[in-house]
Image (spheres, helix red, strand yellow):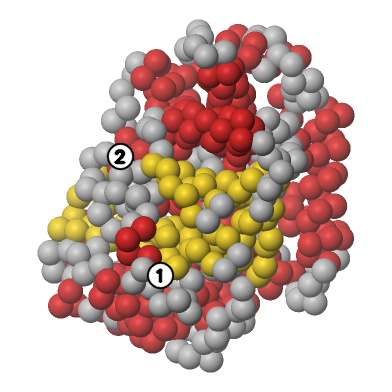
Amino acid sequence: MPRSVVVVSFRPDTDTRTARDVLERFRRGLVARDGQTPHESTHGECHLLVTGAGNEPAEESLSLVPPSRPRHLLDLPPGGWLSLGAHGVEIHTDDLGLRHVSWLTTHDWSAVSTSALVLGAVGECDLDLRAWGQLAQLGHLLTPHTLFAGVERIPHRSTATLHAGRVVLRQRAVREGSANRDGAAVLRAVVLELLSEYPDAALELSGGLDSRVILAAIPPADRSGRMALTLGYESDGDVQVARALAATEGLDQTVVALDGLGTDPDTIRAAAFAAAKARDFIGDGVFGAVLDHAEQQFPQVPRFTGVNGEYVRGFYYAGTASWNRVTPRSVRRLVDWRMTTNSKVSPDHFDSDWLGSQRAGLRSALVDTFLSTSQGLREASDDFYLRQRIANWAGATYSAAAAQRDVLAPFAHPEFVAWAGGVPNSQRKGSRRLARVLADLDARLVDVPLAGGGVPSALYDRSVASHLDRSLRTARKVAAKVRQTAAVTNRPPRATEAVVHHLTRDSSLSDLGRDLGELAWLAPRVREGDPGTWQSLDAAALSFFINLAGVQAFRREVARTATRHNDGT
């Protein structure tokens, strides 16, 4: 499957030498990103460059497609694709925008790519400081921003047509909804549809609710012997619950510990930068290094994942019981309380004036976004979670994983999303409706304890005891969020603690600061490579600066190789 895709279209008056040089820059950009020379083909006046094994568009197969239909060129899982239309090459994004696709237009050419990094470097674009401000505060970008000025993400469920050096975007029609159908029936149908295409698909299994619901949607006869992957430590409650489930259902489970990177700083540093680059430097390279190493211990076969399960669980609801009305004040409170706590970089690492303007800009943009809806705060936060957090935060990892294997995400399927969109927020809260879906799919699994405590049946049971259990669980979540909001730094998960420990004690880490010396929006101590500053970085800050330094190094590499090409060396 494709690792990276670039489609380039030149204006009719672009001279041959310019076109040749631009294509060479894209070749070198893809080599710098993926470490392999792209396969190239021409379709009409568009040039297609693809990296990844076995992704050569089969031109001979195009003649088999009826003339009345767009001619299929290439799949972009989960639901995107390239086709040859009447007016040029068309790139179609999936319904949630999980597989990132971006575009750039210059004076001589336009291009669409699965890598905004390559577009920004080849187009010699400046950094988009609003995007870097978003990344520093939210831990993810907001569509349509990318890390580069002028490069924009193509929204979900959209089609971009390249022709004569220009890009035309249009939104595709919304699919028929299924909000009135039974949630269990919808999910069962989605999982059976995926199983029919991928009968040997594995399952990501944890001790939580989301993966258990997917397991319940798999017919019992199809569970025995099915591969299951669990990430964690044997002493963790999450792993212990997953092991019990796997044994009960006859799954062929593999548990992979998240501590295999060792202690060598050079090895860990290389792994972190490689993981960050695989995510186009918009994801978490620190945890990504741990995750990617663990993935090497497991076959890269099609696999079910619980991504987007939180959409029907009211991800942003905790602590909002008394303020569901959308007002500037309630949105700012949600931003400060919930959105900018998990991955926020300490303000000490930035110029205070720059950070102040970025914080104000982010708040203003989110207030405008929420006020533009006619929904309550919880409903609007559900939409934000789906269209922004999932598409950008989860999408960064999803896009990287989709280059390695087929990622099967039933909770991201259009049918399930349409159903979940109709669930009232009173039923989303506390995972009530999703627990009910689990009961309807397989009643045996609702009384098996969850890793976080309690049993799923208590989430929808209206008895006094169950109500008390839900209240205590909610109180613990709110208390944890209060502690997190007040904390100066974010405590990294156990899996990343070792990475942070070894990297921040690497004496060469402060060299990154010197590479960022021209960026005046960073604090002087960061730009000067002050060892004490760099050795005190937490996981969020370390991930951010790996991304920033990685982007700067990538831009220099592409520019350097292009210069050597132009000099004939």
x then y, percent, for residue 428: 56, 75
Between disc 1 and disc 2, whose residue precedes? 2
Look at 21% across and 69% down and name the residue there: 199
Residue located at (62% from left, 78% from top): 173
Q: Amino acid at mark 2?
A: Ala
Q: Position of residue 128 (x, y in %)?
A: 74, 37
**Residue pictured at 79% horizontal, 20% vertical:** 520
Mark drawn on residue 294: 2
Residue picked out by circle 1: 410
**Amino acid, disc 1:** Pro
* Distance CA(mark 1)–CA(mark 2): 23 Å
Name the image quarter holding residue 430.
bottom right
- Could one spot residue 388 in this view of the protein? no
Look at 65% across and 11% down and name the residue there.
514
Q: With 87 as the anchor, is 403 left or right in this view? A: left
Report whether 254 appears left or right of 239: left
